[in-house]
Image (cartoon, coloured by chain):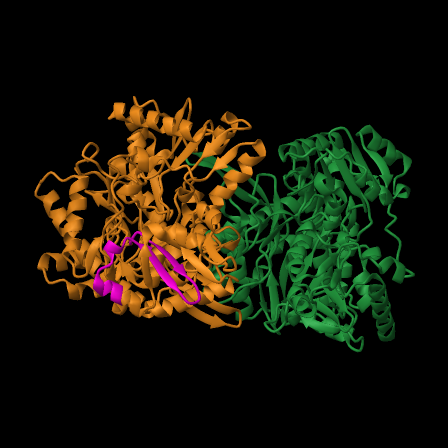
Chain colours: A orange, B green
Amino acid sequence: MKTEIHDRIAQLRRAMAQAGVDATIIPRTDPYQSEYLADHWQSVRWLTGFTGSAGTLVVTADDALFWTDSRYFLQAADQLEGTGIELMRDGLPDTPSIETYLADHLTAGNTLGIDGMLFSIARTDALRELFEPLGVRIMVDFDPIDELWKDRPALPAGKIFVHDIKYAGRSAAEKIADVRAEVAASGADAVFISDLAEIAWVLNIRCDDVACNPVATAFLYISGDEVVLFTDPAKVDEPTAEYLRANGVSVQSYTDVRQYLSWLPASVKVLLSASQSAGQLVSILGERSVVGGSAVAMLKAVKNPTQIAGMRAAMVRDGVALVQSMVELEQRLADGVRTTEMDVDRILTRHRSGQPLYFDNSFDTIAGYGEHGAIVHYEATGETDAEIDGGNLLLIDSGAQYLDGTTDITRTIAIGEPTAEQRHDFTLVMKGHIALASAVYPAGTRGVQLDVLARQYLWREGLTFLHGTGHGVGQFLNVHEGPQSIRMNDTFAPLVPGMITSNEPGLYRSGKWGIRCENLILTTEAMTTDYGSFLRFETLTLFPFDRTLFDTSMMTPDEIAWVNDYHALVRRSLMPALTDEAERRWLDEHTLPLN
Amino acid sequence: MKTEIHDRIAQLRRAMAQAGVDATIIPRTDPYQSEYLADHWQSVRWLTGFTGSAGTLVVTADDALFWTDSRYFLQAADQLEGTGIELMRDGLPDTPSIETYLADHLTAGNTLGIDGMLFSIARTDALRELFEPLGVRIMVDFDPIDELWKDRPALPAGKIFVHDIKYAGRSAAEKIADVRAEVAASGADAVFISDLAEIAWVLNIRCDDVACNPVATAFLYISGDEVVLFTDPAKVDEPTAEYLRANGVSVQSYTDVRQYLSWLPASVKVLLSASQSAGQLVSILGERSVVGGSAVAMLKAVKNPTQIAGMRAAMVRDGVALVQSMVELEQRLADGVRTTEMDVDRILTRHRSGQPLYFDNSFDTIAGYGEHGAIVHYEATGETDAEIDGGNLLLIDSGAQYLDGTTDITRTIAIGEPTAEQRHDFTLVMKGHIALASAVYPAGTRGVQLDVLARQYLWREGLTFLHGTGHGVGQFLNVHEGPQSIRMNDTFAPLVPGMITSNEPGLYRSGKWGIRCENLILTTEAMTTDYGSFLRFETLTLFPFDRTLFDTSMMTPDEIAWVNDYHALVRRSLMPALTDEAERRWLDEHTLPLN
């Protein structure tokens, strides 16, 4: 493998030399700026051998360097060893940014080559602004991968299917009309959509092209009189084609997209998203492009009543699967059966996949025991897979895609009797979770304004967590979606009734344990007063927190009441769906009021 | 007066016609984008008769319109009546913005004339972006006021004096070096500073050109080898001139500034602030201008130990003056002497001005009794001046400029026995005040992240306040300064140790009463842990809150302890400075622990 990596980098350098490129940046992404990638787009993995989910390769005539963040320092050091690729530990004070490194190593007359389909408009503009004043040319159509990677996986070939209106709640034709109104309001005539979740949402179509994200590889063009889905025609069977026709959508081949765009009339103004659309689209569309925000993100984020009802129903089935999983897990541990982190994943997936309407997991399960729980994006592998032996905390972050809803839940569970320190840490996290879950806020409030509620008790003790407190969640769509979020930086999107967001503060004690407590919360109306309209959250997720981990001496009566009320709701919601006596008993015991 | 206004608008229209201007916008500001104006810049008042602190006049051949915000709807309606100027109530759904109005009323080929010295670079750019595509020309040097306003007040003629290093803590020469480093870091060679507080801070000079703001009318140019203060030479006496020379500062006439800038070498890059510098400066400097942020704001906001010591000392004197004022006020009320809102202002100003190092008030006192307290920027006039007769709340927001520090404090006081509803409202506001005052937060935190702490208890009951929670405060300088703030929108400046900010949540019950509780708080180090560096606030203001207004049944033990600890600190700090027995007794009684 290491030799192959050497070869591949050498081949890349030859392609660079032929094209007159002095440096290239190869990001781990696809033309849709996706978080989860189909194999076809795993060129960074092919070029470097690195299998993590974040990293960027930079190659010059002399150097090959790989930037990744702290989650992957150990893994990347291991996987890059002997490849000749130098690891650049992103975020450390001594590590230059890619831009700084290249600005230092390129000189006037040099060319920086990138595949403009893999860089957003905003990023492409930033590169131009930085390098062009230095006399460095940016070549935006340098894409040698297809030629070098002889056995490159084909584009995904999943079949597109229709997401039934009984789950979607609003027809594709209606959504297309909504998008057209947004486009008109932005002053454009048409929109070209790259984001795969947005395409799936607008057309009420789904697919299994990408693990965990039920989307189809495609682009979508919507003008005043046309809707064109660019995708592999083999993915569209006749019933789907008929459905699309009935909603006014024509299908063209994925490979036609550039030609189609370049042949559009000179007068048409096509809206592109600065953060989601590829920079190369601007090169193709030229004066016809209008760069702005997404025309779909806000529409998609606000769920309609049918979607919300679907999410509620999915939460009950997911809760049932989790109760079944916990009963099985506890029984194994009680029986002394060796159980590892990967077993937890298998147990959860088995019970979830037994539930009606299950389609896939919504992301790769994180089951981190003890010190592994402190690694925020930990995913157990054969090498790391730890036995759950008792005396520590088990962090489980998992979720599923059901046809009617998407779940994402994190629970932290004491294996055996927890220590006072573990209970202290857990209770601090839960106090923040409860403060956010109980918040009331005026219409127009953004997540950045509420984030401190979840962090305040940690901060008071000089503790914090570095990830966001909450992300938007799709309905039978990507588990991470915008535009809203609850985090320390401002994403400028207000929390609007109908949005579903996660509430997931945590605390990570390196080398000891990790704690995260995550529910999904729905923004809903609270009240209207002389002072305006006020909103609140309703918690949708239905599964008990570990009662043995609460230190009630640190909690206010209101906080204790919140936990007890929530547990009563969980019991009321899940009990009717449980028939097995052991499962019913488990739920009963685990939803008793706190002492 | 009304006839004069008709005449003045007619004269303005003739000047517009002569210059070929179809519409003009006349904002209430000066070339430094100041909040407080010298009389010379009160052209909106001269043209309209409106005496409030916010408003913009728009004149076309047919219409004269005046936009102002809700604070001034009543006052403006009254003052504009009969002038032929139409009141545009800013912020109401039916009121177009000035831009929308003009875009509807101007057509291709028209000219919009503005005095480019009264519009920031950002605002000028926005006007260009909006109107130029419509074919409307922007004339940026339309300034007919000087010619029309025959008895226009001269530029302020206050004498500049030196702010002693024993208060400033850092010499002008050192600060100039600091600014030069900032300018170099921004890639410019020089900076042209318009903000009067920044100029005063850099050079350690003060003046009485503007009420409440101890600044001098001037511009300041700093390059690598030159520092030029543009001001009226009559303002600079020989000792001050000698002081400036010793710090490498030359003085040129205020009227030379345009010529000086236009004669700068073509190669020099001059940093301007997009929000603080006038748009016309870009027209003068052309390619030599570099538009960015302020090179001074952050340096000025972070107080050095000498400044902090001065602020602390000023707080003691201010607290003493407030105790004296309250004793006098209560005695008057007890004696049945008729006492009005304006009396409160007079009493406060008399006691403050008796304190050592007093220079001026730091803003116009707001003393609002009963329903007047609910008018956020209320200032009692002869017509409104209400008697303080008992049975309601008195809101007093006031402050002073001392040579060593600036104060800004709001207290809400029950006159007589407060009602349960008044105590409820007051306690809600105080719970937010205490939550913000007690916050611990990581280095890098911005005010927008903490704002909810002050609002959360109000929001929970469908209440809020529409002003910011906190603004930066200068040291013997403007009582409102940036870059930090604590408010619902993000101003992107972190809270840094040494910054002084206000903590002033409120609640306004229209027609009933207003409540605001304001202290100044210093950002300081809290602790450094494995999770980074954490900061906290230290309250600087020293004066008791009204103990009769607390409803302790709504408070946690921690909140009650905060109030008791704060009151103990106030007693400890002020008692040694009080000799009068009645004052000592008053302080003693008003700082007892809550029941």
Left or right of B174: which side holds A204?
left
The vertical placement of A461 against B155, above or below, is above
Q: Using the image as rendered, state which of residue A258 and residue B223 is in the foreground.
A: A258
Would residue B204 be visible to someone looking at this image? no
Would residue B355 be visible to someone looking at this image? yes
The vertical placement of B459 against B202, above or below, is below
**Position of residue A468 measured from the top left corner of the image (x, y, whole percent):** 40, 47
Q: Residue at x 18, y 39 (%)?
A: A390
Q: Quadrant of the C terminus of chain A?
A: bottom left
Q: Magenta residues?
A: A216-242
Q: Residue at x 64, y 52 (%)?
A: B543
**Position of residue A494 measured from the top left corner of the image (x, y, whole percent):** 46, 59
The verdict on residue A560 being magenta is: no
The verdict on residue A226 being magenta is: yes
Left or right of A527: which side holds A416?
left
Q: Quadrant of the N terminus of chain A?
A: top left
**Position of residue A247 measured from the top left corner of the image (x, y, whole percent):** 32, 68
Q: Residue at x 49, y 65 (%)?
A: A184
Q: How many marks?
A: 0
Q: Using the image as rendered, state which of residue B181 and residue A357 is in the foreground.
A: A357
Question: Splitting the image into 4 quarters, where does residue B3 fall?
Answer: bottom right
**Position of residue A529 measured from the top left corner of the image (x, y, whole percent):** 50, 72
The vertical placement of A254 against B134, above or below, is above
Left or right of B573: which side holds A96?
left
